[in-house]
Amino acid sequence: MRKALSTAPVLAALLLAACGTTPPTPAAPAQPPAAPTEAPAAPTEAPAAPTEAPAAGKLGKVCQVTDVGGIDDKSFNQTAWAGAQQVTKEFGAEARYLESQQQTDYEKNINEFLASNCDLIVTVGFLLGDATKAAATANPNQKFQILDFTYDPAIPNVWGQVYATDQGAFLAGYVAASVSKTGKVGTFGGINIPPVADFMIGFEQGVKYYNEKNNANVQVLGWDSAKGDGLFTGNFESTDDGRRLGETLMDEGADVIMPVAGPVGLGTAAAILERGNAYLIGVDSDWYESAAEYKSIVLTSVLKRLDVSVVEAARAIADGTFSGGTKVATLANNGVGIAPFHDLDSIVPQKVKDDLPGIIQGIIDGTIKTKP
């Protein structure tokens, strides 16, 4: 059944960001709210933005259509929802969502919001690309934001937000390689689409960079950039599949695993917690916070700051600067990053911690490549 909700605001959290010439080291984010339908804010340090919210009354309603992972996926739908809730705090606006249980719900949910006087309709995920384009083209006065997708040519009323997650995942791969005792780390995805594959590409490249700089030979299981393919569940819903692939990777020797499949990864986390011989890297939000039942095994998380993107689009509507086209979140503008190491900080070599600021700066200035 689809769910709709109006909520109170939540606070955004803070974490490692890359800015200036000497990027900061990770800092512990704030604890998330307890209510399950209020998404924990992805730890973030927002890009430059107005310090004062525009006058109240300029923004009335923000409406989110989720992908099939659901609003409480501990991942990108939940992180985007945290942004919508932050908008309620800044502008006194209403925030609502509709959950998509299957792909045929995308058009239906968008159409329901088209009849609901939404100032901004946020569609979450690559798979909503066609439905969002059709609705935006037919309704040129309605403002849309789609996360993890963009259009060429641009659609004037659609803010297409994409993320250089390969940059954050590169950092995670470097760290993963440094803590592996078996010399094998693993990853898998939900579906082989660019927003998923980018994580896996960056992760592999980070491991390779670690090997190059530290005379190591850590292997990556589950992804091969040369083939453009790897290990996938084919869905973003089945925790059983996440458990199965996590167990497969551990059986093959992986002792650090990064699932890129939304709530599917919770199955992997459960398998790792039971076995106790591996660590997890979360994606999208800081899983130490958003999936706190598994915090003892969360090494770090690759952050995709969808919450910040939603707030930025809402501010642009409120101050009259909203425009369609492609917006890219990177390390340079704090749109992606990695989370603190939290309880596992002691297992990360100090040399690796010391290396990270220079690696971040190298990625920003282009001297370190995060894709082959």
Image: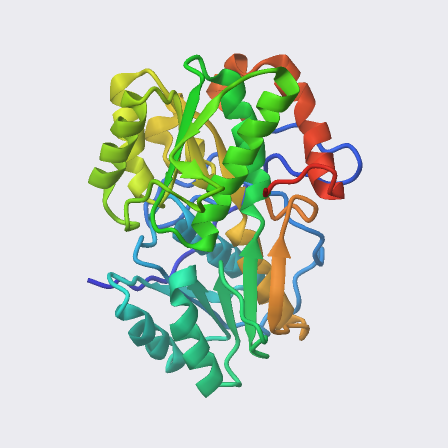
Q: Quadrant of the C terminus?
A: top right
* Residue at the farthest right position: 21
Q: Nearer the viewer, residue 146 or 84?
A: 146
Q: Residue at x 70, y 59 (%)?
A: 52
User: Would residue 350 be found to the left or right of residue 6 on screen?
Assistant: right
Q: Residue at position x 43%, y 68% from top?
A: 129
Identify which residue is drawn at 33% across, 38% down: 265
Q: Is residue 337 shown above or below 109?
A: above
The total of numbered circles placed on residues is 0
132 or 306: nearer the viewer: 132
The image shows residue 178 at horizontal and vertical percentages of 54, 18
View extreme (front): residue: 226
**Up-down relation of residue 330 to residue 178 (above or below):** below
Describe residue 72's horizontal placement relative to residue 220 as left or right: left
**Structure colour scheme:** rainbow
Quadrant in which residue 354 is drawn: top right
Which one is in front, 67 or 292? 67
Quadrant for residue 214, please give it.
top right
Q: Quadrant of residue 153?
A: bottom right
**Closer to the camera in the image, 298 or 169:** 169
Query: Is 311 left or right of 369, judged from the image as shown?
Result: left
Location of residue 103 in the rendering, given as x and y in whole percent from the top left corner:
28, 65
Q: Does residue 338 show up?
A: no
Image position of 133 with respect to 83: above or below? below
Q: Position of residue 110 (x, y in %)?
A: 36, 74
